[in-house]
């Protein structure tokens, strides 16, 4: 895994929590060695390099053994990551302030003729890490090779427990508004989000279809070009079958995930449950989504805890939108595309070129 940002810490830990964190990390090398040795030959790992398997085991260790405040402390902030990452990559750091403590962070050069607005995952509690940025830089360079230069911009939204529902949704609205005012046309804008970021994109559609008075109305002058949901977090309750079936295969951990989800759900009014958990949306909830966005892509991993819920929501969207594609990658883990970039894997997940081609097709139309 790449080095977490050490400057501008987000989570403030007491000294006992800090000691606890250090103590929890001490066994990591031994546990890693053991878990790699015992899982490298498992059938679900047959297409993975040792490098990837080490990365998966390290993530599994962190997800299982660390609390959210400890992970926040370890990873720092999205803004801190962005500043370190742009320096390392020798790319410009271009930041647009949106107000309400939200900002847009541009990956590569800022351009407005074609834009991907990217909402990052992390259970609404963790920042974007540098390998998210590296994945999107890769997508940008691949699109450029095809003669499709694209501006890619990351939304820096506020995190739980400080910020609760619907703060990220309000901040996403500010981002859309900012881009529209700056001259981006909806037909040239694709939304992308992984995990909680995918959840946030579904919240945007929910707000457009069923406006809540707690959030300013989101109106766009025309349908968006596309929405790409990578391993979207659509059930925060962690109770579908795949959560048990894929425990130990995925790097997410069922018990941690349930805890993280419960913390978010605690602040969601019962009437807004479908915003936070699309999987629980009543019949017909997404009717009309066809008029909001031209195309939808939903991807998931065959070996990830969230798989069954991703399929339910993918099918739900398909029902109301003929241009919806649902792709489940065999043996894929949660946000499989990112992990390659965390460990410097050269043989990328099959979903990576698929996402590139799907975005390219949207911009070409
Ligand atoms: C969590 O840490 C313990 C030791 O502290 C270790 O035995 C266990 O394997 C770790 N969990 C995972 C999933 O790596
Ligand atoms: C976004 O930036 C602000 C300001 O530094 C920070 O407080 C916040 O935690 C950031 N969001 C994330 C996800 O790190």
Image: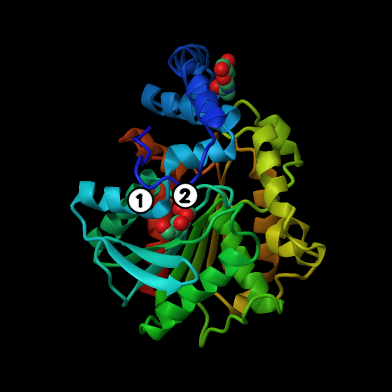
**Residue at which label 2 appears:** 127
User: Looking at this rendering, what residue extends furthest in the front direction?
Assistant: 15
Question: Which mark is nearer the camera, 1 or 2?
Answer: 1
Picture mark count: 2
Asked which quadrant contains residue 307, the reply is top right
Question: Quick one: SS at disc 1?
Answer: helix
Question: Quick one: SS at disc 2?
Answer: loop
Residue behind label 2 places its C-beta within 8 angstroms of ligand 2: yes
Residue behind label 1 places its C-beta within 8 angstroms of ligand 2: yes
Tell me if residue 285 comes above or below residue 163 in the rendering.
Answer: below
Query: Residue 213: which disc?
Result: none
Q: Position of residue 118 (x, y in %)?
A: 44, 61
Q: Position of residue 132 (x, y in %)?
A: 40, 48
Tell me if residue 358 comes above or below residue 321 in the rendering.
Answer: above
Q: Position of residue 193 (x, y in %)?
A: 50, 58
Q: Is residue 318 visible?
A: yes
Residue at figure coordinates x 29%, y 53% from the top left = 83
For label 2, count other residues whose C-alpha is less than 10 Å away and answer few (under 14), some (14-19) or many (20+): many
Quadrant for the C terminus in the image: bottom left
Residue at figure coordinates x 53%, y 84% from the top left = 220
Which residue is more in the foreground, 323 or 346? 346
Which residue is more in the foreground, 319 or 169? 169
Question: What scheme was used to colour the molecule?
Answer: rainbow
Which residue is more in the foreground, 322 or 291? 291
**Residue at which label 1 appears:** 80
Q: Position of residue 351 (x, y in %)?
A: 45, 47
């Amino acid at each position: 895994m790449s080095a977490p940002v050490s400057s501008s810490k987000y989570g403030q830990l007491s000294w006992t929590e800090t000691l606890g964190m250090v103590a929890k990390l001490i066994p990591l090398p031994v546990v890693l060695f053991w878990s790699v040795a015992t899982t490298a030959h498992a059938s679900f790992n047959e297409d993975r390099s040792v490098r990837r398997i080490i990365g998966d085991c390290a993530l599994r260790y962190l997800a299982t053994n660390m609390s959210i405040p400890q992970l926040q402390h370890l990873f720092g902030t999205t803004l801190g990551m962005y500043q370190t990452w742009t320096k390392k990559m020798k790319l410009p750091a271009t930041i647009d302030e949106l107000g309400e403590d939200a900002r847009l962070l541009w990956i590569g050069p800022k351009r407005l003729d074609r834009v991907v607005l990217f909402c990052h995952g992390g259970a609404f509690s963790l920042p974007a890490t540098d390998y998210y940025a590296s994945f999107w830089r890769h997508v940008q360079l691949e699109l450029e090779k095809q003669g499709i230069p694209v501006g890619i911009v990351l939304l820096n939204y506020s995190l739980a427990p400080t910020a609760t529902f619907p703060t990220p949704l309000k901040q996403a609205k500010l981002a859309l508004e900012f881009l529209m005012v700056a001259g981006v046309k909806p037909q040239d804008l694709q939304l992308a989000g992984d995990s909680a970021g995918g959840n946030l994109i579904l919240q945007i559609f929910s707000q457009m279809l069923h406006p809540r008075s707690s959030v300013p109305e989101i109106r766009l002058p025309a349908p968006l070009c596309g929405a790409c949901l990578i391993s979207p977090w659509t059930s925060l309750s962690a109770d579908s079958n795949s959560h048990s079936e894929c425990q130990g295969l995925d790097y997410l951990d069922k018990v941690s995930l349930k805890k993280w989800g419960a913390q978010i759900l605690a602040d969601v009014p019962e009437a807004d449950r479908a915003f936070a958990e699309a999987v629980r949306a009543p019949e017909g909830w997404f009717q009309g989504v066809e008029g909001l966005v031209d195309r939808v892509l939903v991807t998931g991993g065959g070996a990830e805890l969230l798989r069954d819920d991703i399929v339910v929501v993918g099918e739900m969207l398909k029902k109301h939108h003929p241009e919806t594609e649902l792709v489940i990658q065999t043996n894929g883990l949660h946000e499989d595309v990112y992990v390659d970039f965390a460990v410097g894997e050269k043989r990328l997940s099959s979903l990576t070129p698929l996402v590139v081609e799907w975005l390219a097709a949207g911009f070409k139309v």
